[in-house]
Image (cartoon, rainbow, N blue to C red):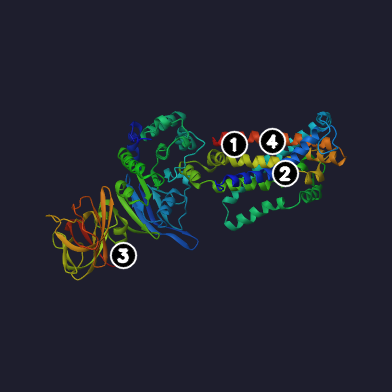
Amino acid sequence: MSAVAFTGPSVMDIDAAKIRGAGSNVHFDKVSVAYGAHVVLHPLTLDIAPGEILAMIGPSGSGKTTALRAVAGFVRPASGRIRIGATDVTDLPPYERGLGMVVQNYALFPHMRVEDNVAFGLRAQGADKALIGERVKDALATVGMATFARRYPRELSGGQQQRVAIARALAVRPRVLLLDEPLSALDAQIRRNMVEEIARLHRSLPGLTILYVTHDQTEALTLADKIAIMRDGRVCSHGPTTELYRRPPNRFTAEFLGRANLLPVTVAEAAGPKGFATARHGDALLTSAGRDEKAGDKSLLCIRPQHLSLTADSEHTNRIVGTLREVHWQGELTHLVLDVDGTPLRVSATKLPMALPEPGTKVPLFFAPADTSLLPEDAGV
Amino acid sequence: MLVWSRSGRLLIWVLFALIFGVLFLAPLAVILLSSLADQWNGVLPNGFTTEHYTDVARGAAWNAVKASLVTGFLASALALVSGTWAALSLRLQGHALKRLLGLLFFIPSAVPSVSVGLGLLVAFSHPPLLLNGTIAIVMIAHFVLISAFTFGNVSAGLARLSPDFEQVASSLGARPAYRLWHVTLPLLAPYLVAAFGLSFALSMGELGATVMVYPPGWLTLPVSIFSLTDRGDIFAGAALTMILVASTLVLLLGLERITARATGS
């Protein structure tokens, strides 16, 4: 089916104000989860502000889904408390938490029509029939599925089913919307469209707090106000999306979020008033955005593949030489892998010189100081 | 297609026809022919008649059909309720307890039905549990023998049911009873219908325990067939068997249609 944009009609807009005032922040207070002796979530303290989208990302088994399920009430914390707004929900059953949840496989009830799926939560809560009709209509209109109300889930495509799942979660006017890898089952093209549509949806419901669990960094970067990166049951970094991307605090974050190149360097001069430090890699003296490094510190220079260029200009003042190892053409992008004194550096280029050097040849790479950051070598996490 | 050659496929079909024909169709065909045979002295009947059907219809046949249908229906319904209840409850228990209780449920199906009948006869022959000579003891015998199959079927259905459905329902505000009635049971419907169908078919053909406990006036079809053949009235027994097969088949086909409608297939 062609992409149908979320439209955000009247009733949802009215409710946005209601949601905004509901104090729908989520607070994890030293929440840990264990199955027997096996701890799957180490004490987690984290806040999600009202109206914020927090993306939890991390590899499989990192504890991100466990954290979401603890909020939903399907996993009982071994210790700690969870608050939604002013309510401590730790001991509340899932049906009393006032949440909406969307899961990877949609979980639309196959024996119910689309409209009955969307009405389910309201009926379960004993809502008035007229209100149910109105909410169902609006929720389906919001996700562009109004004309599919009489269909059964099996008569819909994956993208359409996911829209209905979102409408079903929105119809109950949740305090917090939990999205558990909601786009993982969709193919790449539909997933891209859906990410944009969820972003539009959140713009139309600015008061809605969303906890978005994914292993896809693109989804997280596109949608989230803040990102928490999970590893081995712990949050290894947490912060505003752009900040985390531009200034990753540790190796894992740098590599997981955007597959950054990390070049070992020694700080030659600490950051000055403009925030730039100089660092040495072999003979090359490089300028980088710095933090609180001191001269002589061993550091990692973090630089994104798309910020490395094969051509110099007034901004790309840093120069380093590597040996070209691999070239992978992917249409709009070409990926190069170079070896710089034993460290592989990935380059993603949209424009390349007409005559690309042969693998094995020495190639100069240029990058701008503002596109780099330094992180301590021992902050590997 | 696992077999690509034409001759190979032909061989497989012939093999299948032989096995299916000899093991499944031949006994049924013999019973069908017997039920319609005027006399049978050679390889095939000497002539055909519907007299045996008329005879059994005039006799106690319809009472036996009624007894079998009522017993089958009630015992299967009871087994379905308890099997579903057990499967739903055991799902929430720890792995060890789940396995132990699951095994216990299957024990009656591993015991000869005659022994089950004998056990019930002894157990329910003294006050305050005096059920000997009542219809209830027949129901109990059938229930004990078939409940393992309903439990097994429903457990298999539950194992295949994604927990996401129930969890999403809960997150939307559905309390356990609402969730069970509107989500879990409808999603289990195909398994429930299949469990009922299997239980019903097993109950319709049950003889070993029934023959030990049945009271006068509650002769099920298998008991009636056994009595007729025991007296040497093979043709009437065959006619009654065909009635049993037809009744069971009609009910199972009906259940299959219900399942197809429920699943939309």
Q: Is residue A143 left or right of residue B170?
A: left
> Which residue shows up at 23% across the image and 53% down it?
A306
Question: Residue A356 location in percent, x, y?
Answer: 21, 55
Residue B243 seen anywhere in this rendered image of the structure: yes
Q: Are marks 3 and 1 on the same chain?
A: no
Question: Mark number for residue A380?
Answer: 3
Query: Which tag, 2 or 1, sits closer to the chain's start?
Result: 2
Residue A254, quarter of the rendered image: bottom left
Q: Nearer the viewer, mark 3 or mark 2?
A: 2
Residue B216 seen anywhere in this rendered image of the structure: no
Query: Which tag, 1 or 4, sits closer to the chain's start?
Result: 4
Q: Nearer the viewer, mark 2 or mark 1?
A: 2
Q: Residues within 10 Å of mark 1 (few under 14, many from 20)?
A: some
Q: What amino acid does circle 2 point to? A: Val
Q: What amino acid does circle 1 point to? A: Thr
Residue bearing the label numbered 1: B259
Q: Is residue B205 left or right of residue A210?
A: right
Query: Which tag, 2 or 4, sits closer to the chain's start?
Result: 2
Residue bearing the label numbered 2: B22
Closer-to-camera residue (B141/B64): B64
Q: CA distance from mark 2 to mark 1?
A: 31 Å
Instruction: Evaluate if marks 3 and 2 touch, with contact meaning CB atoms under 8 Å apart.
Output: no
Q: CA distance from mark 3 to mark 2?
A: 72 Å
